[in-house]
Image: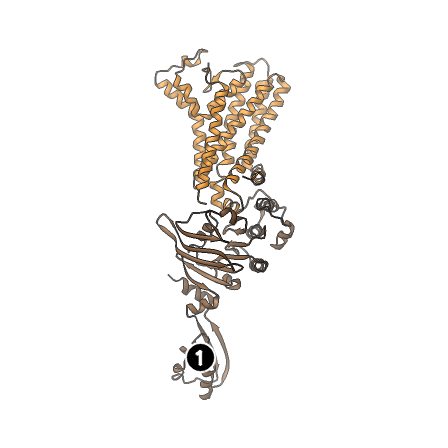
Amino acid sequence: MGKAIEISDLKKSFGNIQALRDLDLVVEENEIYGFLGPNGAGKTTTINILLDFIKPSDGEVKLLGHDSRRESFEIKRKIGFLPERISLYDRLTGKRQLEFVKKTKGADVDLDGLLERVGLEGEGDKKTGKYSKGMKQRLGLAISLIGEPELLILDEPTTGLDPHGKRMVRDIIKEENKRGATIFFSTHILEQAEKISDRVGIIRGGELIAEGTMEELREQVGAESYLRIETDKRPNIDSIEKLEGIKEIEVMGNEIKVKVEENMSFSDFFGYLESQDVKILGFETENSSLEDLFAILTRE
Amino acid sequence: MKTSKVWAIAKKEFRDHIRNRWIIALTFIFVVLTIAASYLTGGKAGEELFGRLQGTVSTLLSISSILIPLIAIMLGYSTISGEGENGALPLVLSYPITRGEVLVGKFLGLSLVLIASIAFGFGLGGIVIAVFAGIENTTPYMVFILLSILLGGIYLSLSIFFSAVCKKRSTSIGAGILIFFWSMIYGTIVFGIYLSTGGTLEQLMGSESTLPGWMWKSIVVSPMDMHGTSAMQAFGLEKAFGYAMDVPSYLNLEFLVVIQLLWFLIPAILAYFFFKRRDL
């Protein structure tokens, strides 16, 4: 399988500020890649370079096998793009603007069907100046879909959308991926990346600091699980700590909170409690939250 | 360069800016003033200040040479800087379209808005003149309209150039205001220099003016003065820098039009090079 995006040793400085330092990143064809990072990490700068809006200071970028600088025209025939802040021509109707894109892309598309797909049915004849923020974002998404692009580059696609809208974006991303498209989207919200990405790359300070599936990322940072157990009496915890895989233990009355290594088998632990004649009334496990993970990864 | 893509941009620009309230307001003022001026100066026989035709033309000229550049600057000043800043232009450039096609399309679309505005103003004004004063000056009037379009084209070209050079919308509007201001006061500057270097008003006002050669030559740096002079010549009248005077023979209509065409083309070409190299 080919590569949809290949970024090697990419550097970009604005004056004294290094926005990107040696960024390396590969997106496989037909993959959903979540480009995750806090605001100001270099996500939009990277996307602007992918689209040849700004010139890199150094490094090489290839999209769908084409050089981003020399063959940007070829690339633009095969991609769809949704910018971070969608800016439309407010004096024109939504449909007119879709028509304009259709013409410049030389695409064949049913605009009413497209409007319906992004939840704007019946709104096409309104000027976009009268659109809400969410509606503009939906129209922007519609624009990016025109021409069945091979690669969709979506910069913070769920910005300004309500939960329904966010789900619609995820559904569309999945549909487009099924059709065969590669999706590269940026977000600063881990939850958004986690829900649909095949792989996630985390950028901080202009560098990719972690990459992989969510499971791989959890392993990389050594994320932990908690086990919460309710018992009928206070167990003797002295020897619990000797059990393998247990890192920390805390007892509050009849409740035990145990920090365990991921994938540890709990049966030893339960067996131990039983041997002490402690009855387990209930238990639950808890992964360290995704937010914690993201915080760990992007900590300065 | 693909015609279909250029047209797509041109159409979009036209549709967008024909609805621009500033343009509508300025065009409205333009229409009202040209009709009023045509009626008052062209329709009223007998009141001959400089001669009836000259009166009409000078009045129309003083209106159009302010409003047309203003409309042109309003159309062009933010077309690259403003749209680059707010993100509309990067979005367009994510489509398979070259920057050259975008720029030519913008020129075309915005020029059409400008032409529509001028045609509206001078068209209605022309009807009033035709009704009250007859149609014997139709040909020079048409030439006058073409010259006005050229004037608008120059300011459109200049404002698009500034829009391509300036990073921000706010600096490009500043540049637009400067170029407009420059054009307005150019005559005053020239005469200030003239009078402070020993020239006298008497020399100006007489029918045989004896302006120094540099003053005449300097007209090529002021599109508005070139426009005024060439418009008067279209009607067979001699007037420059706002005064009636004998214009040297080399400053004929053809020469002035060629220089004005350069004023249109050079900023347009420069705009292309700046736009091509620009980060968005």
Split into 4 quadrants, where in the image is the C terminus of chain A?
bottom left
Does residue A122 appear in the picture of this structure?
no
Tint applied to chain A in the drawing: brown
B15 sits to left or right of B228: right
Q: Nearer the viewer, residue A148 or A94?
A: A148
Spot occupied by residue B74 in the image (x, y as percentages of width and height): 50, 35
Name the quadrant containing residue B186. top left
Residue toward you, A280 or B146:
B146
Q: Residues within 10 Å of mark 1 (few under 14, many from 20)?
A: some
In this picture, residue B4 sits left or right of residue A266: right
Of all chains, the one bearing label 1 is: A
Q: Amino acid at mark 1?
A: Ile
User: Which residue bears the numbered disc 1?
Assistant: A256
Q: Residue B130 appears at what percent x and percent y? A: 63, 20
A61, above or below B179, in the image: below
Taking depth in this image into account, of A217 and A117 the one nearest to the observer is A217
- Left/right placement of residue B212 relative to residue A190 reads left
Res. B273 in view? yes
The image quarter in which residue A205 lies: bottom left
- Where is B199 relative to A38, above or below? above
Which chain is painted in orange? B
